[in-house]
Image: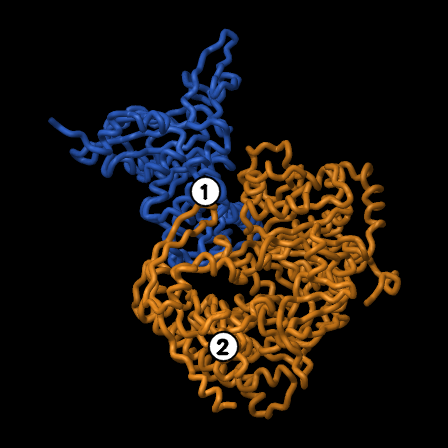
């Protein structure tokens, strides 16, 4: 592990890095944001000035060292600056998920005792005002977009630009103190606190030091050869550790430019305009894009469709090999070049991937078809495995060793070990300091030697040294007959079908597995449109017999594939229902990062689960739903329970 | 997934109340003329002092402040004894009402009551046979609609009237037409002044696009948009003219609840942020009662009610017109 001594010459804090960049890359673009239809950009030296002005303003407003500053809103340069400004003042930025509801925000802000909040717009202001009484330590709110806020009581509220103006005016008074505070920051001071989304229980505040941030940014930038001229698009939630490391950590370390989209809806257009060279997306985004491409190709003219099909087939055959630098015949290379001109190039341009040099996907398993599709186009898409507690990086795939079923080799500086029960442990310079105000959880997760439990079960492949993840360790269980139960493994296989958005598999301690399935409204809706099937709602489409048949075919296909794996053949899905509503974070069924919360789903839908096991062919249910504005309603439905064909265990015996 | 914008707290019904302090829409203020020539205006137990003589219209309350803190100015437009006939049909019979600066004024009534005709009179499309239209303190002579538009009155249409083949941005830019001075020749060359003018007007258009949150469809041809968005684009085009009075002809017709909520919020925001006076026709009673400061009720071309939503709601003639009357 690198110690501060060995790096004593380098910048030891986030603000120090900012000052370095303001000198080193003074006129290079640091942040861009599209506003009013035009990309506005700020150079590194301008960024430093903006951040400093805000920091001075915060000083004037009485921010103390060690204060917590909540930061809530969509990705905007101003909010990234707010994080840096807070650090300049010796305070700790705490980015929160912007779609969190008021109670979730109240919990987090109360837990850390935030005195200040820097927020994006009226929506966030309203949410904080709603819970203000529950926050005794909370004092001042700073907002970016003044729209709709003119008539609010401004005694505890200021506009961002006004705070900066205040800072500039009071510069002489506060600059000495600000510089002194920055000088005090070192590798051990807290750089940021990020709340985990919490698949179980309440969110925990993960404290990351400057060492965590800078060391991780440094080693990962070197691993992928990131350069100052790179561009990224910042569109993933600011509260997520990945975004923090990419848009603040790595951006500061290498000095590349962070681009913020105009709004969430314009992401794809902005992606195309910027053409990032370094791109990160969860599998879901790649999946949606692929689905859209396929849907549009269905509507394309015959000639175009033929071109697409022919060249995509070729790309699938040789594309990944060419990308990995393996031997490919001259004729195939020529044909691939031709395809590049006619199909792959224009397609990549439309998707915004023309310039992608390094692309990552993580968070969940990605379907092999999806993964191969992008790689065959010549996009260097790779997988990485990480978590907040590790400041993202645990393992990643080096160029040339990319496969869809592994998550790669250990990142520089990371050590890995597998416990007896299969749980993965790691130790690295990125290992978090502690869970804030939660020593028990810290002790549970991190031992005295610095080994951290990931909570995931996996193994290291002997010949390649790649790590493979099977499932969450606590979700892995036993079937009644003692065979292994790994729900995630089956769910991922199900989710690889474009028609299936989400799946939840049950069966721990039972004789057979069953599943809940959510259809993907985009894919299935498009199919319905093409086949002249009318539907008025998600619910109606979900219970359409033909949709049920399709899903059943998918489930049976998965069963066949699961049966091939001797360890997991017990996990075949015997019976399933297509749920009447989409699982939603607002109803607590998913986390904000869209991971399934099993326990809550099990409790909430226990009537349906019972029906899955008692042999009934249909079940009537009523479910409460929460709308985004907090109102509640309920959905009543009768669901059909279907049985799927399973591969006999005898097949497995024969295979052995 | 359900998406709706910034509508977290109890929605529209509480909107006005949460922004301000009062529970019910305020009653029209009591005005007393003081000895020193100032008007004293009393609303919600608060006193507001205004100097007399602002605006050209005399003998009315100068201005007052609503419970949610908006200043409603003096009368900006006044309809005096308007009668409109089509041959033998009297669409509007001797109607008088006024519109104050900064207020949201609704015109409601059953089908065929003459609401759209009234809006067309305001926008200059119809010239009434009798009566006068007073605008900003002077009588307005019979005018062509484009002249009315130049005076700062913009409108949207009941049946969307956008240029279907053009992009959203281009449609919004057409709203800037009255603000562009360079001629056809200069614009086709797009040099010097014409270019500068376009840049300037594009900025205004972009700000409105941002305000109405239609950035994602900026370059999409209007024909490809769903109905609700088209309505929003129409609003954007009308706003691009930076009107002093905005006429909305059934802005929420045919929308679902969610779209209505969005549109209501936009209308309130426009009124609030730009201080635009809004006259709207709407069928959805809930929306009208929540949005508007004052309501005119029409039935068979006659005015049967005029006042705050509360007053109108309790007006027996209005109840009869909407629910029908039992004839003995």
Q: Report the number of numbered marks.
A: 2
Name above or below for residue A39 compared with residue A165. Answer: below
Which type of secondary structure does the marked residue at label 2 adopt?
loop
Tell me where residue A640 sits by quadrant. Answer: bottom left
Residue A498: give x, y in percent of width and height: 45, 71
Residue drawn at x 38%, y 55% as measured from the top left: B226
Chain painted blue: B
Residue neighbourhood size for the residue with mark 2, other residues' Cα within 10 Å, grouped as few (<14), some (14–19), many (≥20): few
Residue B297 visible, this orientation: yes
Q: CA distance from mark 1 to mark 2?
A: 61 Å
Looking at this rendering, what residue extends furthest in the front direction? Answer: A481
Left or right of A416? Residue A534 is: left
Q: Between A595 and A91, which is closer to the camera in this rendering? A: A595
Name the subunit of mark 2: A
**Visual hue assigned to chain A:** orange
Residue drawn at x 49%, y 53% as measured from the top left: A586
Which type of secondary structure does the marked residue at label 1 adopt?
helix
Query: Share a chain, discs 1 and 2?
Result: no
Residue A477: give x, y in percent of width and height: 55, 71
Q: Which label is found at residue A481?
A: 2
Residue drawn at x 44%, y 53% as measured from the top left: B2
Left or right of A136? Residue A627 is: left
Residue position for label 1: B266
Point out the image quarter for the N terminus of chain B: bottom left
Q: Between A640 and A492, which is closer to the camera in this rendering? A: A640
Residue drawn at x 43%, y 79% as measured from the top left: A557
Residue A475: give x, y in percent of width and height: 56, 67
């Amino acid at each position: 592990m690198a110690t501060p001594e060995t790096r004593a010459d380098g910048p030891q804090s986030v603000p120090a890095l900012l000052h370095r960049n303001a000198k080193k890359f003074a006129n290079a673009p640091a942040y861009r944001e599209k506003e009013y239809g035009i990309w506005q950009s700020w150079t590194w030296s301008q960024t430093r000035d903006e951040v400093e002005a805000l920091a001075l303003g915060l000083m004037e407003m009485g921010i103390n060292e060690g204060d917590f500053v909540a930061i809530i809103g969509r990705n905007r340069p101003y909010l990234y600056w707010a994080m840096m400004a807070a650090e300049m003042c010796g305070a700790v930025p705490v980015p929160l998920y912007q779609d969190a509801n008021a109670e979730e925000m109240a919990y987090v802000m109360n837990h850390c005792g935030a005195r200040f909040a820097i927020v994006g717009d009226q929506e966030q202001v309203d949410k904080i005002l709603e819970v203000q009484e529950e926050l005794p330590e909370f004092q001042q709110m700073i907002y970016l977009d003044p729209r709709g806020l003119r008539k609010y009581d401004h005694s505890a509220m200021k506009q961002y630009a006004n705070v900066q103006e205040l800072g500039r005016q009071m510069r002489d008074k506060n600059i000495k103190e600000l510089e002194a505070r920055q000088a005090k920051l070192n590798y051990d001071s807290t750089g940021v606190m990020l709340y985990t989304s919490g698949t179980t229980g309440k969110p925990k505040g993960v404290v990351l030091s400057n060492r965590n941030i800078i060391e991780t940014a440094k080693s990962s930038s070197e691993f992928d050869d990131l350069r100052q001229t790179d561009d990224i698009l910042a569109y993933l939630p600011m509260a997520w550790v990945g975004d923090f490391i990419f848009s603040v950590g790595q951006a500061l370390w290498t000095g590349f430019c962070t681009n913020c989209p105009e709004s969430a809806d314009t992401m794809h257009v902005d992606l195309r305009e910027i053409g990032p060279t370094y791109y990160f997306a969860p599998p879901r985004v790649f999946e949606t894009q692929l689905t859209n491409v396929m849907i549009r190709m269905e509507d394309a003219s015959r000639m175009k469709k033929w071109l697409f099909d022919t060249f995509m087939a070729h790309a699938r055959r040789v594309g990944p090999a060419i990308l990995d630098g393996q031997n490919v015949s001259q004729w195939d290379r020529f044909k691939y070049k031709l395809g590049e001109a006619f199909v792959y190039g224009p397609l990549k341009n439309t998707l915004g991937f023309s310039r992608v040099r390094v692309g990552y996907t993580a968070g969940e398993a990605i379907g092999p078809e999806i993964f191969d599709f992008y790689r065959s186009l010549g996009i260097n898409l790779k997988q990485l495995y990480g978590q907040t507690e590790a400041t993202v990086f645990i393992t990643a795939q080096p160029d040339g060793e990319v496969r869809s079923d592994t998550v790669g080799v250990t990142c520089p500086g990371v050590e890995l070990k597998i416990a007896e029960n299969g749980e993965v442990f790691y130790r690295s310079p990125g290992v978090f300091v502690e869970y804030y105000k939660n020593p028990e959880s810290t002790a549970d997760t991190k031992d005295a030697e610095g080994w951290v439990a990931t909570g995931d079960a996996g193994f290291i492949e002997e010949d390649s040294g790649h790590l493979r993840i099977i499932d969450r360790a606590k979700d892995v269980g036993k079937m009644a007959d003692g065979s292994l139960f790994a729900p995630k493994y089956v769910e991922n296989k199900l989710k690889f079908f474009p028609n299936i958005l989400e799946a939840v598999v049950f069966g721990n301690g039972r004789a057979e597995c069953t599943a809940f399935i959510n259809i993907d409204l985009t894919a299935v809706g498009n199919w319905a449109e093409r086949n002249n099937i009318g539907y008025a709602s998600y619910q109606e489409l979900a219970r359409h017999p033909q949709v049920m048949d399709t899903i059943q075919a998918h489930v049976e296909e998965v069963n066949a594939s699961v049966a091939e794996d001797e360890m997991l053949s017990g996990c075949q899905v015997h019976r399933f229902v297509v749920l009447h509503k989409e699982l939603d974070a607002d109803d607590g069924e998913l986390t904000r990062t869209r991971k399934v919360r099993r326990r809550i789903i099990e409790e909430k839908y226990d009537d349906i689960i019972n029906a899955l096991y008692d042999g009934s062919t249909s079940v009537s249910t009523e479910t409460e739903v929460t709308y985004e504005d907090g109102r509640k309603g309920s959905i009543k439905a009768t669901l059909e329970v279907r049985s799927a064909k399973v591969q006999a265990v005898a097949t497995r015996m024969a295979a052995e | 997934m359900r998406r709706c914008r910034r509508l977290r707290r109890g929605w529209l019904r509480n909107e006005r109340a949460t922004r301000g302090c009062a529970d019910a829409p305020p009653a029209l203020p009591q005005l007393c003329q003081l000895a020193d020539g100032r008007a004293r205006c009393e609303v919600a137990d608060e006193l507001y002092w205004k100097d007399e003589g602002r605006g050209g219209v005399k003998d009315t309350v100068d201005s007052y402040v609503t419970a949610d803190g908006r200043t409603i100015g003096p009368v900006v437009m006044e309809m005096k004894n308007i009668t409109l006939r089509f041959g033998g049909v009297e669409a509007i019979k001797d109607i008088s009402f006024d519109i104050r600066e900064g207020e949201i004024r609704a015109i409601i009534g059953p089908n065929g009551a003459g609401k759209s005709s009234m809006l067309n009179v305001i926008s200059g499309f119809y010239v009434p046979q009798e009566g006068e239209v007073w605008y900003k303190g002077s009588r307005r002579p019979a005018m062509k609609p484009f002249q009315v538009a130049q005076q700062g009155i913009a409108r949207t249409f009941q049946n969307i009237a956008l240029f279907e083949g053009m992009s959203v941005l281009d449609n919004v830019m057409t709203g800037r037409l009255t603000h562009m001075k360079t001629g056809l020749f200069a614009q086709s060359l797009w040099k010097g002044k014409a270019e500068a003018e376009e840049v300037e007007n594009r900025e205004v258009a972009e700000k409105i696009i941002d305000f109405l949150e239609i950035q994602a469809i900026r370059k999409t041809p209007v024909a490809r948009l769903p109905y609700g968005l088209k309505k929003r684009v129409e609003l954007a085009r009308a706003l691009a003219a930076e009107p002093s009075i905005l006429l909305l002809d059934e802005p929420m017709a045919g929308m679902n609840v969610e779209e209505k909520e969005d549109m209501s919020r936009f209308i309130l925001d426009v009124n609030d942020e730009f201080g635009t006076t809004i006259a709207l026709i709407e069928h959805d009673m809930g929306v009208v009662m929540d949005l508007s400061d004052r309501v005119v009720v029409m039935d068979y071309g006659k005015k049967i009610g005029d006042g705050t939503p509360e007053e109108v709601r309790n007006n027996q003639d209005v109840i009869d017109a909407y629910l029908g009357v039992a004839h003995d």
